[in-house]
Image: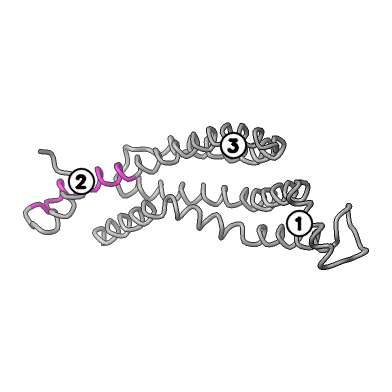
Amino acid sequence: MNKSIEVMWKEGFVNEAHLSAPKVNDLYNRKSQNLVDKLLNMFAVNIKAIVWGCVVMLIIMSLVGAPFLGLYICCLLAPIVILAKKELKKSVDLSKGQSSYDYIVNFNHWLKSSIKVYSGYYKIFYPLFFLGMATQAIVSKAGGKLIALLLEVFPTSLFILGQPYYILVVLVVGIVFFARYAEAIYQWDLNMVYGRQFKKLEELIADMEELRK
């Protein structure tokens, strides 16, 4: 029965006989390639999930009477798909012919660069997403009833764009909040999906650097 890379990895440090340079190098090559391939596959699956998610969401939004909101969100997600495909294509330029250490370090640099690109767009995405959801809530029947109730509790003669001024204040505060903390929200979302694999990547690089000393 073939042993998994993880089992071989552990045995390599338990049994000193397994610590010959060629075997250790081969083990690192296989482990690093396995981890990189897994992450790239996850990224590719995520792109497909966003595309199909847009289709399903647009259908559902249309059925519940909010087709414009569904189309609006799809338009916001489209640049993410474009960016993701563009960044994923850059990973092809990483040479697998170099040493496992150089390869995985270059992959880590590419990964951090891609995350920085996505973070830049999410600073726009989250505020606009909030704006779209809030606008739909305001113009909906349920939103109209809630605003009418608020006017009874907090009456005012100051209206902006046909809405009580405090509704617009809440809207602006929400937009500023999501713009300010967009990067933190994106990092949290990223770690929820890829956090375990990112940790393995950091540990692998740390182990390889330790052995290179």
Kindly report the secondary structure that dominates the magenta region of the rendered protein: helix
State the residue at coordinates (35%, 45%): 103
Which stretch did the figure color magenta?
A: 18-35
> Which percent across, then down, holds residue 194?
42, 50
Q: Name the residue that disc number 3 marks.
A: 57
Q: Name the residue that disc number 1 marks.
A: 146
Q: Residue 99's image quarter?
A: top left
Q: Earlier in the sequence, mark 1 or mark 2?
A: 2
Q: Name the residue that disc number 2 marks.
A: 5
Q: Earlier in the sequence, mark 3 or mark 2?
A: 2
**The C terminus - image quarter:** bottom left
Q: CA distance from mark 1 to mark 2?
A: 58 Å
Structural crowding at the residue carrying mark 1, measured as other residues with C-alpha within 10 Å and reported as few (<14), some (14–19) or many (≥20): some
Find numbered disc 3 in the image and state the secondary structure of the residue it sits on: helix
Find numbered disc 2 in the image and state the secondary structure of the residue it sits on: helix
Of residues 143 and 103, the one drawn nearer to the viewer in this rendering: 143
Find numbered disc 1 in the image and state the secondary structure of the residue it sits on: helix
Of residues 81 and 31, the one drawn nearer to the viewer in this rendering: 81
State the residue at coordinates (66%, 62%): 180
Q: Residue furthest left?
A: 17
Structural crowding at the residue carrying mark 2, measured as other residues with C-alpha within 10 Å and reported as few (<14), some (14–19) or many (≥20): some
